Image (spheres, helix red, strand yellow):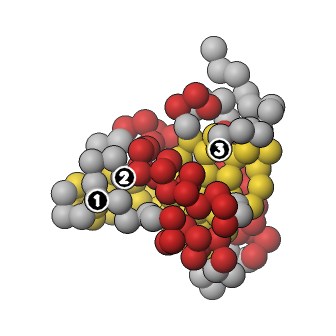
């Protein structure tokens, strides 16, 4: 049974969140790869004016996070992870919806991302939000794994929360 999240607070990440975000990235996104999303790299994104690092705070360990970079015409969802205990409760959907609303407010309507080609759960999640595959990138992940490049124009159906 799906239990929607009601005890989560979405907030902008603080510098002190960087180690927890890096650990989650290593465990849930970069598993099996050399870690590239280090504490320092995440801290740079937290400080960077064209990045948003958003966390799902359950008043304890972080339940999830997302990192998005904003350009003039497009935004790029760099990372999204939800801790296993909080999956299938709407946390990921809430993080993406918040970022999509921010993109629309900024006048950026096209959002792109990459996902491991063999990560069927993540692919299905993004497809359910309206993201479509636009390319396969061979060896994208450190020459070891392919990625699917996905994209969504948020003008087409509103944000993922309004569309669902």
Across and down, in percent, residue 77 comes to 54, 63
- Examine the rendered structure and indicate whether residue 106 appears above or below residue 146: below
Side of 113 where 5 appears, left or right: right
Label 3 vs label 2, nearer the camera: 3
Front residue of 129 and 8: 8
Number of numbered discs visible in the structure rendering: 3
Q: Which residue is mark 2?
A: 30
Q: Give the residue at x 77% y 39%.
A: 59
Front residue of this view, candidates 102 and 24? 24
Circle 2/circle 1 CB separation < 8 Å: yes
What's the mark number on residue 62?
A: 3
Quadrant, the C terminus: top right
Q: Residues within 10 Å of mark 1 (few under 14, many from 20)?
A: few
Q: Tag 3's secondary structure? A: strand
Residue 127 lies left or right of residue 60; in this view the side is: left
Q: Is residue 147 visible?
A: yes
Helix, strand or loop under label 2: loop
> Residue at coordinates 71% horizontally, 38% vertically from top-left?
60
C-alpha separation, residue under disc 3 versus residue under disc 1: 23 Å
Location of residue 11 (image quadrant)? bottom right
Tell me what residue is drawn at x 44 percent, y 64 percent.
Answer: 37
Q: Residue furthest bottom?
A: 72
Structural distance between the alpha carbons of marks 2 and 1: 7 Å
Answer left or right for 19 relative to 6: left
Q: Are marks 3 and 2 in contact (CB under 8 Å)?
A: no
Q: Are marks 3 and 1 in contact (CB under 8 Å)?
A: no
For the N terminus, give its image quadrant: top right
User: From what the image shows, is residue 120 above or below residue 102?
Assistant: above
- The residue at which mark 1 appears reads as 34
In this view, the residue in front, 141 or 120, is 141
Q: Position of residue 157 (x, y in %)?
A: 69, 54
Give the quadrant of residue 53.
Answer: bottom right
């Amino acid at each position: 049974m799906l239990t929607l999240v009601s005890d989560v607070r979405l907030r902008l990440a603080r510098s002190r969140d960087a180690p927890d975000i890096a650990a989650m990235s290593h465990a849930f996104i970069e598993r099996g790869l050399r870690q590239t999303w280090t504490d320092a790299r995440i801290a740079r994104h937290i400080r960077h004016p064209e990045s948003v690092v958003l966390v799902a705070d359950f008043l304890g360990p972080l339940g999830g996070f997302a990192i998005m970079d904003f350009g003039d015409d497009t935004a790029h969802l760099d990372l999204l992870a939800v801790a296993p205990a909080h999956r299938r409760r709407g946390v990921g959907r809430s993080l993406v919806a918040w970022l999509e609303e921010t993109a629309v407010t900024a006048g950026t309507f096209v959002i792109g991302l990459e996902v491991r080609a063999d990560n069927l759960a993540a692919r299905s999640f993004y497809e359910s939000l309206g993201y479509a595959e636009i390319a396969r990138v061979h060896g994208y992940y450190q020459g070891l794994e392919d990625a699917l490049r996905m994209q969504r124009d948020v003008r087409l159906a509103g944000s993922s929360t309004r569309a669902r």
